[in-house]
Image (cartoon, rainbow, N blue to C red):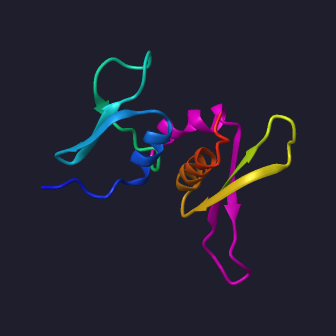
Amino acid sequence: MSAPEKPLNVRVAEVLGWTGIKFMGKTWWGFSGPGLHAGEMPVPAFDTEWSATGPLIEQYDLEVGPTYAGLGSRLPSWSATAHSRENRDGEEYARGDTPLVAVCNLIITLHAEGKLD
């Protein structure tokens, strides 16, 4: 059986420096990086667990809030915004169906643009 397509939380883990990520059974496993944990562990559910993603919001100085598609829309989408250290205006943003998906999308975007520090 081959591994499924990498889900959002696994792509975030790769951006954050996780190594040796592989699919075993029903779970993605990997190594989180030097000094964090010893041994292989399940990849956190960054896209659904606040306890996994909350520290990233603080670490990367991100803001999260609802964005409404229009007056006729009852359900919000969510946006995450990154601010530079020098300029407090929002520089980069990403959207998602939930707050954590928006944050994950933004972390991946910032990494791709070389702005994740």
> Is 115 contained in the magenta span?
no
Quadrant of the image occupied by residue 84: top right
- Counting labels gives 0
- Depicted 98 relative to depicted 111: above or below: below
Quadrant of the image occupied by residue 42: top left
In percent of width and height, residue 95 lies at 62, 61
In percent of width and height, residue 107 lies at 58, 46
Q: Residue, x 58% and y 36% (percent of image)?
A: 56
Q: In the displayed orientation, state which residue is furthest to the left.
A: 1
Q: Which residues are magenta?
A: 49-78
Q: Which one is in front, 113 or 12?
A: 113
- Depicted 23 relative to depicted 79: above or below: above
In the image, taking residue 16 as reference, residue 109 lies left or right, namely: right
> Is 56 contained in the magenta span?
yes
Q: Residue, x 71% and y 37% (percent of image)?
A: 61
In percent of width and height, residue 57 lies at 62, 39
In percent of width and height, residue 83 lies at 77, 43
Quadrant placement of the C terminus: top right
Q: Which one is in front, 64 or 41?
A: 41
Q: Which one is in front, 68 or 110?
A: 110
Q: Residue, x 66% and y 36% (percent of image)?
A: 60
Quadrant placement of the N terminus: bottom left
In the image, taking residue 96 as reference, residue 70 lies left or right, namely: right
Q: In the displayed orientation, state which residue is furthest to the bottom.
A: 72
Q: Which one is in front, 40 or 58?
A: 40
